[in-house]
Image (tube, rainbow, N blue to C red):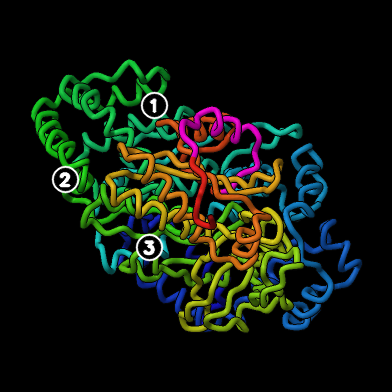
Amino acid sequence: MEAPLLLLQRLMEAAQVVTSNGNADGNYQYEIISWFDSVSKNAAMVQTETLGQILHLNYGVEYLKKWFGDMKIQDMDACALESLYASLVPLASHADFEPFIQRIADGDTAPILTQQPITTLSLSSGTTEGRQKLLPFTRHSSQTTLHIYRLAAAYRSRVYPIREGGRILEFIYSSKQLKTKGGLTAGTATTHYYASEEYNIKQEKTKSFTCSPQEVIFGGDYKQSTYCHLLLGLLFWDEVELIASTFAYSIVQAFATFEEQWEEICSDIKDGTLSSRITLPRMRKAVLDIISPSPCLASQIEAICRDSKASNWYGIVPRLWPNAKYVYSIMTGSMQPYLKKLRHYAASLPLVSADYGSTEGWIGVNLDPCLPPEDVNFAVIPTFSYFEFIPLNKKKQDLTSGTVGYIEDEPVPLSQVKIGQEYELVLTTFTGLYRYRLGDVVEVAGFHNGTPKLNFIFRRELILTVNIDKNTENDLQLAVERGSEVLNKYGGELVDFTSHAEVMHQPGHYMIYWEIKGEVEERVLGECCGVMDASFVDHGYVVSRRTNSIGPLELCIVETGTFNKVLDYFIGNGAALGQFKTPRCTNNHILLRILNLCTIKRFHSTAYN
């Protein structure tokens, strides 16, 4: 068998023969699936080899010297090195790496985290912890992105084959690219990928293109880009094979925009013009170079839209793009609340969940594209990083504890995980992160050969807590789902939501902010509020509510467009729409100011009266 890491490099170099939309060359398809079968069968050995390669490539960097000193690790047995690494190098969080990354950003060119020069830094979306994190981005980051797209595409094409030469309606957006004090480029990881050679390979060598030119993707104004994505997607309506975006949120956002702007878009298609709302010169010129008058197409689209508007836009996606095979994006975790609306737009068109990754690195691939997003799991790719798993065991009820409801055991390697057990993921990457606690809680659902298949559960940081109560993002989403079921029963629709643990006044209490669509009576909203309050079943919360050491849950109804203001706030601070996730729990004072200024109704739960 060819060495897995050498074969991976060869596959990366040959990547131009397959595109991320599933339109893959048959030989490459067979080769990449065979490669993954090989590395997954030998996952334990491949992981040991991967760690050895990372440590050998970065031997002598400042961070590792803190722990290894002058040890000659190049001569060590790979298994012994793996054991030594776990015993010497401590688990770390982003806060531990932040001073080192900041020095790199400020222009320090010494080998601090990697021996390879770092010239680019990724910005996380900033919606999880309220501020953006800087993380190293290297050529390896782009290569693994390209490679996982191709691996996933090979599996998707078995189920949903795509016509050669078909187009993708991709709602993708760049963020602002900044220069750090040391002259490094900083931007979102997706922005770096769209600007990379690997993205150009996908676009040019395969002759399979997104509907929008680079001037639209890199326009810098997401509202203008969205309009152009929709316009061009409709001009190429019969060539579109799939609809895609990084996150489900972006697709829902795009079609909410379409509901408002479809008549203007049809006018542009009819006359071959471009709305005056597109003011960016390069974007405007690029789109005008593509469009031409199409009155017949405009009439067809108008008829579909008038009919669809009467049915609240149900099934608009397959009606406008009848050759589309599926909708593709990340649909797990914080994206699950958007699935209902996405299914409404897509009707019977399959929703396929994209793969599992983070700004820090890619983790797993979706091998079962037929599974609904709620049931999807991800097979870990053992060559991308070195993975460890911290076993998490739920605590017995201990109301005096300040931890997050888990007892942590010592981390175990990939080969020792158990089905049904929950873990926190730990990454060691080629980009200079060592035993980095990702904060993601996953459950092992099974195995693909010897590599685990993971269900994403939630992020540990997103916790609603006032005192002894500990509610996760997942707990919040379940409570909101139950409340929104009542809302739906009376003709309302939940557009978006977030929450806050208010502790400035005693007793502290949970505040949940809803933006809704449709007219519902106040008694219904009061019922929604009580249902959510009763849906938090954490023992600490229930006991605290019964004793009134936590006050009644407060439901705040915000005016229409509030969450667009939230989006604009994050975009204005460097986030990209394609990477945006509404924060589900926030202490950000600016965000709370926006929410409270836009609140038009307040309800307090009577669930514990």
Of the numbered discs in the image, which one, if any, rests on residue 277? none
Specify whether residue 342 is in view.
yes
Q: Give the residue number, with chain letter if any, for mark 2.
A: 319
**Residue 27, x across and y down, in percent:** 33, 69
For disc 2, the neighbor class at 10 Å (few under 14, some 14 to 19, many from 20) is some
Depth check, mark 1 against mark 3: the one in front is 3
Q: Is residue 151 above or below residue 593?
A: below
Residue type beneath disc 3: Pro
CB within 8 Å, label 2 to label 3 = no
Q: CA distance from mark 2 to mark 1?
A: 24 Å
Quarter of the image where one finds residue 23: bottom left
**In screen coordinates, is 106 left or right of 383?**
right
Quarter of the image where one finds residue 283: top left
**Residue 195, x across and y down, in percent:** 51, 40
**Residue 498, x across and y down, in percent:** 52, 45
Q: Is residue 492 above or below residue 372?
A: above
Question: In the current view of this chain or complex, which residue is farthest to the front?
Answer: 609
Q: Looking at the image, which residue is at 14% across and 33% down?
A: 306
Q: Looking at the image, which residue is at 45% across and 61% down?
A: 355
First to last magenta residue range: 585-602
Q: Give the residue number, with chain letter if any, for mark 1.
A: 224
**Residue 77, x across and y down, in percent:** 76, 82
Q: Looking at the image, which residue is at 50% across and 79% down?
A: 40
Residue type beneath disc 1: Gln
Residue type beneath disc 2: Arg
As rendered, which of 234 and 80 lies closer to the eye? 234
Q: Give the residue number, with chain letter if any, for mark 3.
A: 373
Label 1, secondary structure: give it. Answer: helix
Q: Earlier in the sequence, mark 2 or mark 3?
A: 2
Question: In the current view of this chain or complex, which residue is farthest to the right?
Answer: 70
